[in-house]
Image: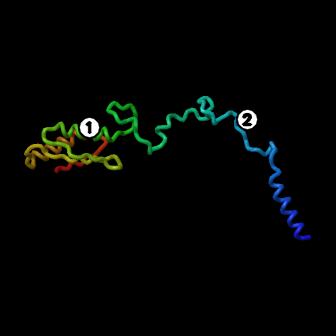
Amino acid sequence: MKKWLFFTFFAVLMLSGCMKGNDTENTAYDLKKDTMNPNYMSNRANNKPDSDMGEMSDQNPNFLNLRGTSLNDASNRNNTGRDIDVARDIVNGTDDFRSESIWITNAGDRMTVTVDTKGNLNGKERDDAIDKLRSKLEQALPRYSFKIREQ
């Protein structure tokens, strides 16, 4: 008798799990049939709750800088590649030096310019030419402090 009672209880328990089916109150929420609330999941621009978010290109700092790489840049961010090109043009525009490598620190406040001398300069002339080059670089790019190295 106990075996029969246990088997019956187990069968009722298993069959009661299969009885759920046509209950409309406990079914999942259907967004397409909802007419009470506005549809914020739509792709239409007028249904967005926050329409003043702006462009998504500036949201993630890991995105590539696709804007801001040309010389006539309209964005307000610092473009270190352009600054390096300006410094290279200034160094190569002098008669005494040729640019080798130009580095900007991670903090963005110091630029290291490695130059090679074109002609024969003795100590005093070389120091004067380096001072003149430093003043030209500081005038063109005032946000950096410069370290000029000779090779």
Query: Which residue lies at the image location 49% right of the left edge and 41% below the top edge?
Result: 59
Q: Position of residue 121 (x, y in %)?
A: 8, 46
Q: Is residue 113 left or right of residue 123?
A: right
Q: Which mark is residue 86?
A: 1
Q: Is residue 135 left or right of residue 10?
A: left
The residue located at (12%, 46%) in the rendering is 126
Give residue 99's position: percent from left, percent from top: 20, 43
Q: Residue at x 28, y 41 (%)?
A: 84
Q: Is residue 7 left or right of residue 76?
A: right
Q: Are marks 1 and 2 in contact (CB under 8 Å)?
A: no
The residue at which mark 2 appears reads as 34
Residue 112 position in % (x across, y down):
25, 48
Which secondary structure lies at badge 1?
Answer: helix
Q: CA distance from mark 1 to mark 2?
A: 60 Å
Give the foreground label among 1 and 2. 2
Q: What secondary structure is marked by label 2?
A: loop
Which quarter of the picture shows residue 87?
top left
Quadrant location of the N terminus? bottom right
Question: Which residue is at a point 16% across and 46% down the rendered structure image?
Answer: 116
Give me the disc on residue 55.
Answer: none
Residue closer to the observer: 93 or 126: 93
Disc 1 marks a residue whose amino acid type is Val
Decide: few, some or many residues near mark 2? Use Cα within 10 Å; few <14, some 14-19, many ≥20. Answer: few
Counting from the top left corner in percent of width and height, residue 120 is at: 7, 45
